[in-house]
Image (tube, grey):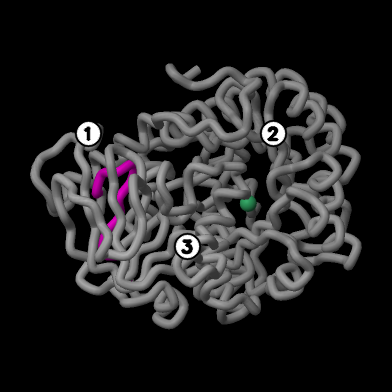
Amino acid sequence: MTPGRPPPARPPPAPEPDPTADQASKDAMSNATTVSPAHSASTASTLITNIAALVTNDPSLGDRSPLGLIQDAAVVIEGDRIAWTGHQSKAPATDSRVDADGRAVLPGFVDSHSHLVFAGDRTQEFNARMSGRPYSAGGIRTTVAATRAATDEELEANLTRYLREALRQGTTTFETKSGYGLTVADESRALRLAARHTDEVTYLGAHIVPPDHADDPAGYVALVTGEMLDACAPYARWIDVFCEKGAFDGDQARAILTAGKAKGLHPRIHANQLSQGPGVRLAVELDAASADHCTHLTDADIDALANSRTVATLLPGAEFSTRAQWPDARRLLDAGVTVALSTDCNPGSSFTSSMPFCVALAVRDMGMTPDEAVWSATAGGAQALRRTDIGRLTPGARADLTLLDAPSHVHLAYRPGVPLVAGVWRRGVRVV
Ligand SMILES: [Zn+2]
């Protein structure tokens, strides 16, 4: 149990200090340019002004769109929170000042779906897939073997590396999962390591049935809902299942998520990624925070999502990296479903940590407008984690901001592949 982490039966939004986020900030700070006098982030106020376009995600502000876009804007950070947002001509006095130089500012990205506790490499599998050659190695099983063989230090060094990479691209909150250990000891180890770096930790013992239980899937479900759950619950906030043909069926997924709920974990589901199935409707039935992937949906699935609190989290890096059919974001949005965008960063099917890349794909190939994609990558991700303190830039929100080297957030889709992130503040501290 990591010191300071809440007990298993916790309410959903639990924003509180996250030691490794601070460590990541410190690490990143060693390479950062100091922008203001050496005030402690706990007391100082900083004005960021001369912002050409500020995305607040508060529809009562600015242009009254869902993005609450304010032109010629300023933001005041006080300690680790946003203290003021508005037109720059009305900004209050502060201790220090940063000139955004006519560029755009938006909330830090909220990456609500990643698999970053792993070891090993699957370059050959990707290369074969992209070369049209058959590849018969073990897929997830390859990563499971490498992860089990790795030391704690190796796993944590790998995790930290991808977190730094994501931070440089504007991600200030991330969720990450177990799922490459698939034994009691290896799953709980993955979650213990992840919990040092984020509050958004997900127990995914039900990723696949591991080879050692291939002849006894029911026995594996019993382990996942029994001894493994007991060992993992103290480190996790969420429980997840890969509900898909070849992984876990609807009845197994329901048993696993229900057992997790009884231990104080809240459900989220890998649903309807490769084929239609029961995952999305199960997510709604269990009030899961999110149904993730949502590529193969029936009209009934979409109706269920639209009439629920469950967010549809779309993961375009997976379709890109496997040359699979794109999820139809337009169909979901037109039906009134809340959509989040996330990377699904993992070594097999989506090895990108870049939220800007996912925004560009969502606009180019999934029918989203640039405004919708930016909202889904910030406020949508926050909603998929049932958080109200992130994903917006309004007074009281956490001071997590991204400064783009561009005059508008639209450039995230307009200039794909370009490293536009020029600055990142996390909890009020400039870290990039
Ligand atoms: Zn995933």
Q: Which of marks 2 and 1 is nearer the N terminus?
A: 1
Task: Determine whether, in the image, residue 98 is placed left or right of residue 108.
Answer: left
Amino acid type shown at disc 3 = Leu
Q: Residue 428 in magenta? A: yes
For mark 2, does the 10 Å Cα neighbourhood hold few (<14), some (14 to 19), or many (20 or more) residues?
A: many
User: For the view shown, which residue lies furthest in the front direction?
Assistant: 90
Residue range of the region highlighted in magenta in the rendering? 420-430
C-alpha distance separating marks 1 and 3: 27 Å
Q: Does the magenta stretch include residue 10?
A: no
In depth, the one of 424 and 388 nearer the eye is: 388
Q: Residue 151 carries which label?
A: none
Q: In this view, does 193 lie above or below 302?
A: above
Q: Is mark 1 on a helix, strand or loop?
A: loop
Q: Residue at x 69, y 53 (%)?
A: 311
Counting from the top left corner in percent of width and height, residue 135 is at 64, 65
Front: mark 1 or 3? 3
Residue under the image location 74 percent in, 42 percent down: 288
* Local crowd size for mark 1, using a 10 Å CA cut-off: few (<14), some (14–19), many (≥20): few
Work out whether residue 181 can be spotted: no
Q: Which of marks 1 and 3 is nearer the N terminus?
A: 1
Q: Residue 61 shows which numbered tag?
A: 3
Give the quarter of the figure containing the C terminus: bottom left
